[in-house]
Image (tube, coloured by chain):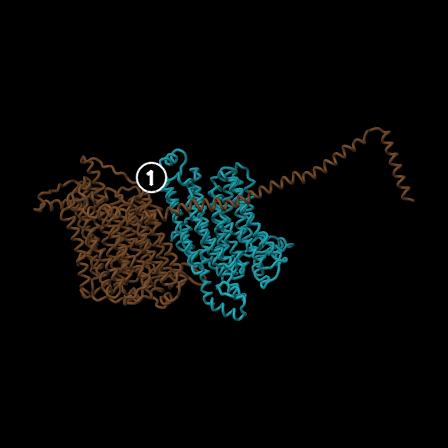
């Protein structure tokens, strides 16, 4: 076979192969050498990133194909099923290309960041092996040309996520969180698998192009009745696929795993789960959107069941998670709920047909959320070491009771925003980049990426508002969520970085990059006369760690601003390059809605209002040490406890779903059915036969043996009696002979006559 | 037909281990190394032959009605029994699995110190029994080897097993014998009725025998065939083991020595499914799908089989979840995984019967399948029209392809379960052998003590869990996909079982490896006995892991052969 591996048709295979090769190499060869393993992992993802960029360039500039109508890709025979052959391959269309901009870059930055963050961990090699496998799986998912290969990447990623969440497997809570994540998503995955299987039966293919880019196929799927639950085949398959997304993208009611996934090595796996992996769920529904929306005419506000499902689940999740994010103190958990909420935006956007906006927000969100998570990791890293430094400076060690296993309202001390404050003076780079990420998340008008994508979603909902109650519902939910988002972001940032340190740990937190320059600059300001900062030495080890950790932050901060400019409304800047580019993925070119200032103004007001309120409460007069959180005071203890306990949903699941089934397994399946009923019946049979055997034995001894023995005895007795004849005396014998002779002669004579 | 036993490949392959067993058996007890290596080398030779058979079937698949490596010799002409052997894709796959697993099991049983020659001889003896079933094309030979495999396994459990070995061995033996009884009677009935024990002849003639009614030995033919089918099915269901005939399995596995468990789960359980595909389904196409009534409830036997499959998937998984004994957990996982095989078999049986009814113009049968009411009173033409309307031919074609998908999945699942369950038992046994306990509650926090073992356990556990990219997934996916249209409710229920599969595998991993560093076992590890997996065990596990990965990434290497046999079975 003549294959040019660097043609755009085959390049995707190489992109997938390199991280996977790194994984194999680390596991089989280099696992004992940390530096070597790290190098292998970095080289693998680095090459994958370069090749992705090359591929992206080829798709955008170097082709005269009309991308979208023709795509790059290659396939191989994977399964022979009767006369049919299932082919599995890779595909590069505009959507994939757009994802390739984000995924390998995000992964590469995580790898670099992990060098710093995981320094000194004994299982570094294992960590980088998992990361490589994770990256390979995510790239597989993005580049797959069919649902089955996508599902393979999907599940392998699930496995990596389980392993990384439970990476510190000595901790009971980490281990439980890993299992929780795996099992919660598996609930959705098994149903999604049925959906894929059923689609395969009806369509006889799982190839995206053959199904989604094929009007006849979509028509057939919509018109054919499903084998169960009524409705059409398309609707059933769509709902099952959406359930997959609900699990993977942590949507209500399967959202419970993501906040606990923060048990993983602080920001890195958190970031994987929050910024990359969970995007996979949304990517799936973005990818198969033509199937989900088949039969609906959403341009004219006619929606179908899958779209209603997405709209309702997405907006409920967006709002619910935003509410929960307000009531958290764990910096990572705030971000986790924020992630759930933002993913809800995307799902809801698809529900009202805002396809381009969803994809746009997906990529932007990945950038700024990756930034926020990594920044939070850098904060936590500094706080953990701050505890030790504080001890060196004579502050007593505080003792914290680690809970035994997962506890809903427990917050580890280094993660607790209430214990921070003033960290901008320790970690200026982190603080500023995190501010940029936060502004992007909150949708700060005009300059941030988050604003443009969120605005597009809101604009689409606004567009349909007057025509149908469904977009109005979505709009109201999302707008409320947006206000809360801006507020909790401001709360998080000001509590972490603003004001004075509230604990010794925050006061002595490890200084990050450029702190020296920051101190000089700060002390020179006239308004900082009352709060002079001290210079202090930084160990080269810390400097390196923070360099490796804060470099990716800067790159991402840049992207958190600029990534949005490619998708600005056409009416505002003349051309919307993203819309034109992505639209080729769909069979039907989605019309861009007319630009309207009203929703844009609304987004601005909401974002600025939320941020302003956050500043009013937390920025204007920063919370002092010992002072209660104003939000907590305002909400009152009951509501606060409800938020801390996550609306008690987790407890509900555990108590009324998991535990009963476990008890059922032990008591009914094993004890009552297998041991008592089945084995009981068998043992009864066995005992019956044993008893019968005993009975036969007795019959043998008494009757049969008795008879036989009796005959023997009789013969013996007769013989004993008869023996008496043999006396040994000749006279008696002669007498007997004579008598016998007489008898015989008499008989003889009688006969003759 | 030659008068003497032909020296062909299949016969040699089947009988070589038996000769080897005899040689090893008479070795002196103290010649431990000699016995071990002789056994290993013989099994490796058989493995090479098995690979050769598989490769040949792969490159020249036998045409419909033909058999690869077919050989026939006069053997017992008085009752029309001949030594008739031959293979198709299905048996070639199973032969490959057997050929691969036996040397690995023998390598694992190097750890046995007690009565080594006898132990090794039993494994070779077992191999003959297994291979014999897969190559047999004569019912009497089939039955002979079917029973022959039982004996060495019984002794392996009885003599080298754990504490409760007598109970387990007897339970195993009696359970299986109970199944064999029906098999024997049904075999004799069929053989004597049609005057031949040759399997191809039986497959040709028995389904058509008195197709339009009649009597055998004074009993109505439908009743005779029904009970004959039940006789076959019971034997095979026990062997698989399908719920509720599975309770011998946990005991037998738990008490069997590691290598015994490997072969028991890896190959012996496949005999049941093989029996269905080779005999029980093609011999009784009509009986499977004919509509039966219980009071006002209408059902057919395929539905019941599907129900047992789902019960196995769900209850097997829950049973595994509730265990605290590592080996018992793995044993129940077999019930869970083989449930998917049975589900695929049910769909295949349904379609086999439908195809047969079509080919033989049995429209009243099709009417039952299509759910046509009142077909008994219809005239022929009306019946044909009604059936074609209710269940049009193109829909039958489409459903036939679904069944091909499901059956491919079921056979692939047999193969991959052979790999993963053998691997899981190897690992369970490896730990038990060193720690002398299987109680999961006593472990935890072992990963830092046994890093290699931990990594291997996670890999094999994930294969068993059905993680995509490893072997278990493809089979499960195909069964789920192919069965959904025929049995949507069953498939959805079995998804609950698949969910629990995840739970029990993660539970095992968590209870063994995760948690705080285990001081107690660390101390044991340092002073008593290393808990880390031994090199020999890694060597035995590595081929399995490689195959799990290759089958997961590129299943076509084995699926091509399987698919040929599926096409033979359900038509192209």
In this rendered view, identify the residue nearer to me: A22 or A580.
A580
- Is residue A611 left or right of B263 when viewed as pictured? left
Which chain gets the cyan colouring?
B
Task: Please give the chain letter of the residue carrying mark 1.
Answer: B
Which chain gets the brown colouring?
A
Pointer 1 residue:
B516
Vertical side of B419 occupied by A721: above or below: above
Furthest residue to the left? A526
Q: Quadrant of the N terminus of chain B?
A: bottom right
Q: Position of residue B194 (x, y in %)?
A: 61, 59
Vertical side of A114 occupied by B401: above or below: below
In this rendered view, identify the residue nearer to me: A316 or B6.
A316
Check disc 1 and report its element: helix, strand or loop: loop
- Is residue A288 left or right of B412 when viewed as pictured? left
Q: Position of residue A190 (x, y in %)?
A: 38, 54
Q: Position of residue A488 (x, y in %)?
A: 21, 51
Furthest residue to the bottom? B381
Furthest residue to the top? A729
In this rendered view, identify the residue nearer to me: B183 or A480.
A480
Residue A467 in which image quadrant? bottom left
The answer, for residue A217, to whether it is visible in the render is yes
Q: Disc count in the image?
A: 1
Q: Position of residue B30 (x, y in %)?
A: 52, 36
């Amino acid at each position: 076979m003549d294959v040019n591996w660097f043609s755009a048709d085959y390049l995707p295979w190489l992109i997938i192969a390199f991280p996977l090769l790194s994984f194999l190499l680390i596991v089989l060869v280099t696992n004992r050498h940390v530096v070597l393993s790290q190098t292998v992992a970095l080289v693998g993802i680095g090459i994958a990133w370069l090749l992705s960029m090359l591929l992206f360039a080829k798709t955008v500039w170097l082709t005269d194909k009309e991308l979208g109508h023709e795509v790059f890709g290659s396939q191989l025979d994977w399964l022979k099923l009767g006369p049919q052959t299932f082919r599995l391959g890779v595909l590069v269309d505009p959507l994939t290309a757009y994802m390739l901009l984000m995924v390998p870059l995000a992964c590469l930055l995580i790898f670099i960041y992990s060098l710093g963050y995981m320094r000194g961990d004994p299982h570094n090699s294992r960590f980088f092996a998992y990361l490589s496998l994770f990256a390979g799986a995510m790239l597989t998912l993005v580049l797959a040309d069919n649902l089955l290969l996508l599902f393979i990447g999907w599940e392998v990623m699930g496995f990596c996520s389980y392993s990384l969440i439970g990476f510190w497997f000595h901790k009971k809570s980490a281990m439980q969180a890993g299992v929780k994540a795996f099992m919660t998503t598996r609930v959705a995955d098994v149903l999604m698998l049925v959906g894929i299987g059923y689609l395969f039966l009806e369509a006889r293919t799982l190839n995206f192009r053959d199904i989604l880019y094929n009007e006849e196929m979509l028509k057939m799927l919509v018109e054919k009745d499903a084998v169960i639950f009524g409705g059409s085949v398309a609707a059933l398959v769509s709902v099952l696929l959406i359930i997959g997304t609900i699990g993977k993208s942590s949507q209500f009611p399967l959202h419970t795993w993501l906040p606990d996934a923060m048990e993983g090595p602080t920001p890195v796996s958190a970031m994987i789960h929050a910024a990359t992996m969970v995007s996979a769920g949304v990517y799936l529904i973005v990818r198969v959107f033509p199937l989900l929306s088949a039969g609906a005419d959403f341009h004219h506000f006619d929606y179908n069941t899958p779209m209603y499902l997405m709209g309702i689940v997405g907006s409920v999740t967006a709002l619910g998670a935003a509410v929960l994010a307000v009531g958290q103190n764990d910096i990572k958990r705030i971000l986790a709920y924020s992630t759930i909420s933002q993913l809800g935006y995307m799902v809801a956007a698809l529900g009202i047909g805002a396809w381009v906006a969803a994809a746009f927000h997906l990529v932007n969100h990945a950038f700024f959320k990756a930034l926020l998570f990594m920044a939070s990791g850098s904060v936590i890293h500094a706080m953990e070491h701050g505890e030790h430094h504080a001890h060196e400076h004579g502050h007593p060690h505080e003792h914290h009771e680690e809970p035994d296993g997962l506890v809903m309202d427990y917050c580890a001390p280094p993660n607790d925003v209430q214990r921070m404050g003033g960290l901008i003076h320790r970690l200026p780079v982190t603080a500023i980049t995190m501010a940029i990420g936060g502004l992007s998340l909150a949708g700060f008008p005009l300059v941030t990426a988050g604003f443009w994508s969120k605005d597009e979603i809101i604009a689409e909902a606004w567009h349909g508002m007057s025509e149908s109650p469904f977009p109005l519902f979505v709009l109201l939910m999302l707008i409320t969520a947006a206000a809360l988002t801006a507020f909790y972001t401001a709360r998080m940032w000001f509590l972490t970085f603003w004001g004075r340190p509230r604990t010794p740990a925050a006061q002595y937190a490890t200084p990050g990059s450029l702190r020296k320059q920051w101190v000089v600059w700060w002390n020179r300001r006239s308004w900082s006369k009352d709060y002079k900062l001290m210079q202090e030495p930084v160990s080269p080890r810390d400097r390196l760690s923070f360099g490796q950790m804060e470099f990716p932050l800067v790159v991402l901060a840049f992207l958190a601003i600029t990534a949005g400019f490619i998708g600005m409304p056409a009416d505002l800047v003349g051309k919307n390059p993203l819309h034109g580019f992505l639209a080729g993925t769909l069979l039907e070119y989605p019309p861009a809605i007319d630009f309207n200032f009203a929703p844009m103004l609304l987004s601005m007001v909401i974002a600025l209002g939320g941020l302003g309120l956050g500043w009013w409460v937390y920025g204007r007069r920063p919370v002092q040490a010992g002072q209660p959180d104003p939000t907590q005071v305002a909400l009152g203890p009951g509501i606060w406890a409800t938020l801390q306990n996550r609306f008690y949903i987790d407890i509900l699941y555990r108590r009324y779903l998991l535990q009963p089934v476990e008890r059922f397994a032990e008591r009914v399946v094993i004890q009552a059915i297998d041991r008592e009923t089945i084995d009981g019946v068998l043992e009864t049979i066995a005992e019956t036969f044993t008893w019968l055997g005993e009975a036969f034995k007795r019959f043998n001894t008494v009757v049969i043996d008795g008879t036989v023995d009796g005959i023997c005895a009789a013969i013996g007795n007769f013989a004993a009696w008869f023996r008496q004849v043999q006396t040994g005396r000749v006279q008696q014998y002669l007498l007997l002979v004579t008598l016998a002779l007489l008898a015989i002669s008499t008989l003889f004579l009688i006969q003759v006559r | 037909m030659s008068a003497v036993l032909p020296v062909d490949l299949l016969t040699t392959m089947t009988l070589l281990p038996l000769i080897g067993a005899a040689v090893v058996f008479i070795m002196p007890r103290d010649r431990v190394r000699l016995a071990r290596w002789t056994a290993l080398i013989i099994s490796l030779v058989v493995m090479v032959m098995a690979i050769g058979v598989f490769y040949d079937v792969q490159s020249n698949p036998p045409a419909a009605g033909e058999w690869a490596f077919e050989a026939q010799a006069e053997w017992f002409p008085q009752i029309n029994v001949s030594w008739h052997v031959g293979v198709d894709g299905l048996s070639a796959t199973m032969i490959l699995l057997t050929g691969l697993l036996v040397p690995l099991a023998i390598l694992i049983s190097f750890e046995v110190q007690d009565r080594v020659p006898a132990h090794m001889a039993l494994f070779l003896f077992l191999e003959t029994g297994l291979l014999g079933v897969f190559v047999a094309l004569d019912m009497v030979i089939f039955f002979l080897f079917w029973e022959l495999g039982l004996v060495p396994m019984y002794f392996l459990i009885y003599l080298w097993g754990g504490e409760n070995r007598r109970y387990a061995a007897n339970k195993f033996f009696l359970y299986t014998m109970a199944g064999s009884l029906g098999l024997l009677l049904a075999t004799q009935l069929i053989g004597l009725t049609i005057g031949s024990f040759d399997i191809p002849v039986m497959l040709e003639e028995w389904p058509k025998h008195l197709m339009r009614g009649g009597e055998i030995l004074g009993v109505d033919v439908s009743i005779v065939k029904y009970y004959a089918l039940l006789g076959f099915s019971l034997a095979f269901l026990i062997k698989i083991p399908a719920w509720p005939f599975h309770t011998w399995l946990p005991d037998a596995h738990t008490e069997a020595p590691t290598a015994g468990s490997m072969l028991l789960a890896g190959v012996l359980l496949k005999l049941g499914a093989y029996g269905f595909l080779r005999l029980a389904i093609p011999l009784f196409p009509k009986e499977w799908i004919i509509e039966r009534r219980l009071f006002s409830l209408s059902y057919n036997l395929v539905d019941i089989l599907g129900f047992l499959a789902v019960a196995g998937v769900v209850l097997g998984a829950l049973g595994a979840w509730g265990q605290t004994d590592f080996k018992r957990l793995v044993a129940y996982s077999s019930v869970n995984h083989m449930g998917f095989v049975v589900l695929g078999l049910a769909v295949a049986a349904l379609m086999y019967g439908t195809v047969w009814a079509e080919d033989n113009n049995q429209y009243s049968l099709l009417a039952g399948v299509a759910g046509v009411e009142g077909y008994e009173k219809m005239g022929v033409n009306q019946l044909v029209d009604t059936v074609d309307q209710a269940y049009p031919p193109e829909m039958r074609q489409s459903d036939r392809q679904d069944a091909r998908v499901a059956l491919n999945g079921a056979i692939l699942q047999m193969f991959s379960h052979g790999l993963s369950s053998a691997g899981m038992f190897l690992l369970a046994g490896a730990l038990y052998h060193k720690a002398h306990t299987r109680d999961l509650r006593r472990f935890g926090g072992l990963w830092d003590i046994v890093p290699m073992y931990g990594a291997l356990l996670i890999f094999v556990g994930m294969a068993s869990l059905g993680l995509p990219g490893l072997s278990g997934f493809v089979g499960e996916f195909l069964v789920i996909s192919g069965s959904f249209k025929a049995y949507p409710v069953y498939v959805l229920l079995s998804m609950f079982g698949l969910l629990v599969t995840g739970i029990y595998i993660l539970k095992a991993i968590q209870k063994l490896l995760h948690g705080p560093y285990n001081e107690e076992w660390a101390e044991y590890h340092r002073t008593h006995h290393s808990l880390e997996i031994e090199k020999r065990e890694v060597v035995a596990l590595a081929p399995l892991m490689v195959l799990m990965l290759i089958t997961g990434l590129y299943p076509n290497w084995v699926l091509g052969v399987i698919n040929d046999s599926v096409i033979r079975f359900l038509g192209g």
